[in-house]
């Protein structure tokens, strides 16, 4: 079942079109919304929450229409905004408690929920310190806690890993995963890094220039984007080395695709790399290079610079 259903959503600002006829279904679970800077991620989230109107098109969130039921949507959804929204003089406990009360919880319940959510995000010990003195990682955790405090059915997290170092990033991604596995809350989480959402999300929606590029289960996306690229040469000076390697790899059911001097082979399992190396060497050919194909992920993604982090291991064999 879809949590969010979007049909032909368009958002025009005077100078830019932020969303252009976007239609997509977001399934239950953790869904990553990926796109380069300016792709329209935050705009989409704000429209879904009724914080800014769409120019045209429509959408439902947990069955509620954005045009007619924005209040119900905001009751059901917890929202972690992209930018810092924490008053520096308030403590995490005061701030989260305040938002819990604003959402309508009675004092005792609000106090209990505040303690629970701050404990859940790992901010229990530090909860009485003024937030002005918090690190970026601590602030991101408090922002996550305030999104969870009113016991929402789903949360929208806008760039929750922004500004975090690799360790902080991993911890935040684990926390996000747990929001779903422990509490059964569906998550829509944005990032400009495809790689970090690949491991956290069940499903990934990729947008570029306000248009839908891909909407795919993470398993599908990973198998399609994880391709090895190799280049071979014949030490004896033969000129058909690439074609020889291609045939040999095809005989091992590796589905190679030739493009000039390069061969592209989809990764089908943990032994694909070894299989390629052994097959090529059995033909008496030399391997000039064999590595993860960066280009195809960048193509899906739309912006090479934003690719950082998605190659991870297995990159520099
Ligand atoms: N209030 C606004 N007025 C005018 N243009 C806007 C406004 N908000 C966003 N835009 C423009 O709409 C486009 C999409 O912006 P948006 O913030 O949704 O992108 P994003 O994917 O969240 O980017 P980022 O990764 O930088 O957060 C951009 O070109 C942006 O400049
Ligand atoms: Mg944004």
Image: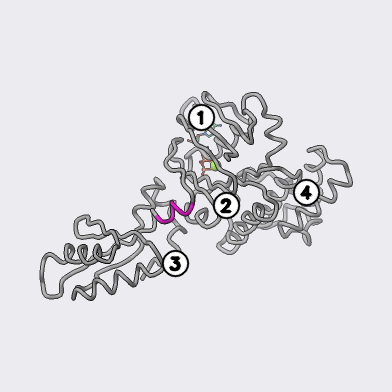
Per the model, the C-alpha gap separating discs 2 and 4 is 22 Å
The quadrant of the image that shows the C terminus is bottom left
Q: Give the x, y percent position of residue 241.
A: 16, 67
Q: Which residue position is annotated with label 4?
A: 89
Q: Give the x, y percent position of residue 302.
A: 39, 45
Secondary structure beneath label 2: loop
Per the model, the C-alpha gap separating discs 2 and 1 is 29 Å
Q: Nearer the viewer, mark 2 or mark 1?
A: 1
Q: Earlier in the sequence, mark 4 or mark 1?
A: 1
- Check residue 313 in the rendering and tell me which mark sits there, or answer none: 3
Per the model, the C-alpha gap separating discs 1 and 3 is 38 Å
Residue drawn 50% across the image and 55% down it: 198
Does the Cβ of the disc 3 residue fall within 8 Å of ligand 1? no
The answer to the question of whether label 3 and label 4 lie on touching residues, with beta carbons closer than 8 A, is: no
Per the model, the C-alpha gap separating discs 3 and 4 is 42 Å
* Residues shaded magenta: 218-223
Q: Give the x, y percent position of residue 166.
A: 55, 62
Q: Which residue position is annotated with label 2?
A: 162
Q: Earlier in the sequence, mark 3 or mark 4?
A: 4
Q: Is 221 covered by the magenta stretch? A: yes
The answer to the question of whether label 4 and label 1 lie on touching residues, with beta carbons closer than 8 A, is: no
Q: Which residue position is annotated with label 1?
A: 7
Residue drawn 43% across the image and 60% down it: 311
The answer to the question of whether label 2 and label 3 lie on touching residues, with beta carbons closer than 8 A, is: no
Q: Is residue 154 left or right of residue 248?
A: right
Q: Is 141 covered by the magenta stretch? A: no
Secondary structure beneath label 4: loop
Q: Earlier in the sequence, mark 2 or mark 4?
A: 4
Which quadrant would residue 293 be assigned to in this image? bottom left
Q: Nearer the viewer, mark 2 or mark 3?
A: 3
């Amino acid at each position: 079942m879809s949590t969010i259903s979007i049909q032909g959503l368009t958002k025009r600002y005077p100078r830019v079109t932020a969303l252009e006829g976007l239609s997509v279904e977001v399934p239950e679970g953790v869904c990553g919304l990926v796109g380069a800077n300016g792709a329209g991620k935050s705009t989409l989230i704000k429209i879904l929450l009724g914080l800014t109107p769409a120019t045209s098109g429509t959408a439902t969130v947990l069955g509620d229409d954005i045009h007619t039921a924005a209040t119900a949507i905001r009751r059901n959804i917890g929202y972690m905004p992209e930018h810092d929204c924490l008053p520096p003089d308030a403590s995490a406990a005061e701030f989260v408690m305040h938002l819990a009360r604003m959402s309508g919880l009675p004092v005792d319940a609000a106090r209990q929920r505040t303690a629970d959510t701050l404990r859940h995000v790992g901010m229990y010990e530090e909860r009485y310190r003024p937030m002005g003195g918090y690190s970026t990682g601590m602030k991101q955790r408090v922002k996550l806690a305030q999104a969870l405090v009113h016991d929402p059915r789903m949360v929208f997290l806008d760039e929750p890993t922004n500004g975090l170092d690799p360790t902080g990033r991993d911890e935040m991604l684990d926390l996000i995963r747990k929001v779903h596995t422990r509490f059964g809350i569906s998550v829509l989480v944005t990032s400009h890094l495809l790689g970090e959402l690949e491991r956290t999300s069940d499903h990934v929606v990729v947008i570029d220039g306000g248009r839908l590029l891909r909407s795919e289960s993470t398993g599908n996306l990973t198998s399609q984007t994880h391709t090895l690229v190799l280049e071979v040469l014949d030490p004896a000076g033969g000129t058909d080395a690439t074609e020889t390697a291609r045939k040999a790899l095809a005989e091992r059911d590796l589905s190679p695709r030739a493009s000039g001097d390069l061969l592209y082979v989809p990764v089908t399992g943990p032994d694909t790399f070894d299989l390629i190396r052994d097959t090529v060497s059995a033909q008496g050919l030399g391997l000039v290079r064999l590595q993860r194909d960066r280009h195809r992920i960048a193509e899906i993604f739309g912006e090479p610079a934003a690719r950082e982090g998605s190659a991870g291991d297995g990159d520099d064999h």
